[in-house]
Every structure is written in C-alpha cells, then in structure tokens.
Image: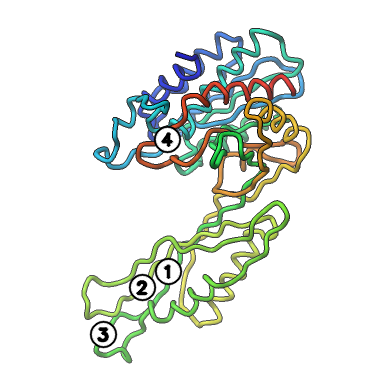
C-alpha cells in the first residue's frame, strides 16, 4: 500500500463531520512534528485549527486545507459505510476521499519525500482548519488574523480543494467569485382568500420583483471571471391552511459575483428593484466572501509545470465554482491557487477518488516544492 493511500485511509476513518475534527489534525501533526515542523494549535470556539512551519526563511509556501467533511446523508444510500475507507475496482470510497482528505495526505507525503532529499531555501507551512464546510467563522479566517498579528507572511499558498473536473490535472483554480447571501422577508396583510381586498398577499406582490431579479444581467464578467449570477435557493410562505392569505413570504437567495461588482453595489441595485414595486420588505445580508484572483505569474507557472510533468497535460486556469478558504488567505502580496483531485463525487453519496491518482497528487505537490 502506498504511503499516500495509507494516510488517506487513516483520515477517512475519522468521522470528522464539521466542525468536529475527530482527531484528524493530530494524525497530521504527528507526521509533521517528525519532520521538524514547529506546531501551533489554534482552537477558536469549538473549531480546531493548526499552523505548522518548517524553517524561517523566505519565501514561505503554505499548504492549506480542511479536515472537516459534510454529513454523509442517508447511510442506507451508501454502498459501504462512509467512514470506513473501502477500495473497489481501483477506487477509494468514503466521505472526504475527494474533498479533501486525499489532498491532505498527499501534502504530507510530498513534504516527507521532499525533505528526505533536500533542505528548502525558503520555508514550508501548513494552515489546517476543521471549519471550511461549516460557517467558516472560527477557522482559516481567524488563523490568518493570528498570522498577521504574529508577523507571519505567506508568499505562496496551495489549497488542496478538488479542482480537477473530468481528468486529474485538467484544471487549476486561480481565483473564485464572491458570495453574497440575502434573507428577504416580504410583508403583507393576512386575510381570507375569499376577501383579497381586505388583505395584501406578499406572494403576489413579490412575484414581479423576483422575476426581475432573476432575469437581470448583473454584469458580463471579464476575461478571468464568468458573469455574476443570482439564484433563489428557498421560498416559504403560507399559514398552513389553503384558505388563508399569508402575512409574510420568506425568500433566500445568493449572488455569486465577479470582481466587476462589489457587495455594496449589488445590495443597492437589488434594493432599488424591490423599491420599484412598492414592496414592504426587510433583507438580512450576509457576505460569505469577496472575489479573489491570482493572475498568471510565478506560482501558476510552477504549479502548471508540476502538473504537466506528472499528468502530461497543461491545466486550464479557472475561477469557476463555489467559494473556498482561499478567499481568506489571498491578498495583494499572497498568491493563492487550488489544486486537487477530480471533484465529480464531492458532497455526494459514495464519494470516491481514483487510487492511482493519490501518489500522482503527492508528486505534483512535491514538484511545486522543488520548483519554488
């Protein structure tokens, strides 16, 4: 059994449903300590995090990732227990197999192999959280604050999110769109459905505004980013009886926005549409993260070269998909990319990854270390 597979299996065997790390980080810490990494455990609230560093010279390349996973859902739908790593027909099954315990294992094995051969001119870091799949309030964002307070500057960061789309190595994420959530409450006047003149139906008054919000072109994106999108994720209205006009309608929606917009502009435009229809409403806004972007440069060139050396293909540079903890790490002075296994099965029943690609992933990460 390869070292990467063995470590991945150990991590999958831990039922680390967010925010419970369930001992995964101690497994990683033990391996990193043996290599000479200095470890700082950084718990915030009920969330476990740690920062590890080998060396103190510049530049600092950090590997970032999360040990928490999403819940497995209906256990009866799984072909094998989600937290018992199962190998079948060349694939490894289990929650976290792709997102992202295989990446964590590959990062550690890459460092073990690299440090066995040479001493880096710079230094290597690990920023690991158990709060990526949850609210993301006590995880990476607070570790980054701690790093700033302690004058630790990350030059380059590789996040182990499953970036590959169809074939391993076909995609490198160099940015992500921002995410803005809205909780909209539209107010009406409750009444009997037979006497609508004595009531105000919030569902009826909301429909034209929601239709306009859904059909609006918010921007056209740019060369690196797709256009901003608006999606309604939940609508709830009704008093529990077919003959009652409800008093309120609640709508949850999300903007995934490009750098062509900012959260303040989106809020203003959204509220102006609602105001146009004379709707009585309240909105609870929550910004999950702003867009980030690492333009092609030294980090992307080194990562692409490593991917091509191992897989034989040049990856597409992409900013598609949802948010990641890279949004908390990226800055004007910190280049961030994401690379990991194929993401086809993430968050699904029977999550899995190709066993033959685990060692390839470790080789890609090791190649990045060698080049940087």
Give the residue at mark 4. Answer: 69
Marks 2 and 1, the one that precedes in the sequence:
1
Mark 4 secondary-structure assignment:
loop
Q: Quadrant of residue 329?
A: top right
Give the residue at mark 3. Answer: 193
Q: State the residue at coordinates (57%, 24%).
A: 360
How crowded is the residue under tag 3: few (<14 C-alpha within 10 Å), some, or many (20+)? some
Marks 4 and 3, the one that precedes in the sequence:
4
Mark closer to the observer (1, 4)? 4
Query: Residue 250 location, x and y as percent?
Result: 39, 67
Give the residue at mark 2. Answer: 248
Q: State the residue at coordinates (41%, 27%).
A: 92
Q: CA distance from mark 4 to mark 2?
A: 35 Å
Task: Kindly indicate whether the residue at mark 1 contacts the one at mark 2 (C-beta within 8 angstroms).
Answer: yes
Q: CA distance from mark 4 to mark 3?
A: 46 Å
Give the quadrant of the N terminus.
top left
Mark closer to the observer (4, 3)? 4
């Amino acid at each position: 059994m390869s070292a990467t597979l063995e470590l991945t299996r150990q991590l999958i065997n831990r039922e680390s449903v967010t925010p419970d790390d369930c001992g995964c980080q101690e497994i990683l810490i033990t391996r990193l300590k043996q290599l000479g990494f200095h470890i700082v455990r950084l718990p915030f609230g009920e969330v476990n995090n740690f920062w590890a560093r080998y060396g103190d010279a510049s530049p600092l390349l950090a590997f970032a990732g999360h040990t928490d996973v999403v819940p497995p859902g209906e256990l009866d739908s799984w072909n094998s227990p989600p937290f018992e790593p199962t190998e079948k027909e060349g694939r490894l099954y289990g929650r976290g197999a792709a997102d992202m315990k295989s990446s964590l294992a590959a990062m550690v094995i890459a460092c073990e192999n690299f440090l066995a051969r040479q001493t880096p001119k710079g230094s290597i870091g690990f920023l690991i959280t158990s709060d990526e799949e949850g609210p993301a309030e006590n995880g990476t964002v607070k570790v980054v604050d701690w790093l700033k307070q302690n004058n630790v500057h990350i030059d380059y960061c590789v996040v182990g999110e499953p970036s590959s789309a169809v074939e391993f190595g076909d995609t490198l994420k160099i940015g992500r769109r921002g995410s803005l959530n809205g909780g909209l409450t539209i107010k009406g006047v409750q009444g009997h459905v037979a006497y609508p003149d004595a009531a105000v139906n919030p569902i009826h008054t909301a429909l034209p505004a929601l239709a306009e919000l859904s059909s609006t072109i918010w921007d056209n994106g740019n060369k690196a980013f797709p256009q901003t999108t608006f999606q309604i994720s939940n609508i709830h209205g009704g008093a529990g009886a077919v003959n009652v006009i409800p008093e309120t309608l609640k709508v949850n929606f999300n903007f995934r926005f490009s750098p062509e917009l900012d959260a303040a502009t989106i809020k203003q435009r959204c509220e102006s549409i609602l105001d146009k229809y004379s709707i009585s409403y309240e909105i609870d806004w929550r910004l999950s993260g702003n867009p980030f972007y690492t333009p092609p440069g030294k980090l992307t060139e080194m990562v692409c070269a490593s991917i091509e050396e191992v897989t034989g293909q040049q990856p597409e540079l992409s900013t598609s998909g949802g948010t990641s903890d890279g949004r908390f790490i990226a800055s004007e002075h910190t280049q961030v990319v994401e690379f990991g296994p194929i993401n086809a099965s993430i968050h699904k029943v029977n999550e899995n990854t190709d066993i033959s690609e685990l060692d390839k992933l470790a080789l890609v990460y090791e190649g990045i270390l060698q080049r940087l």
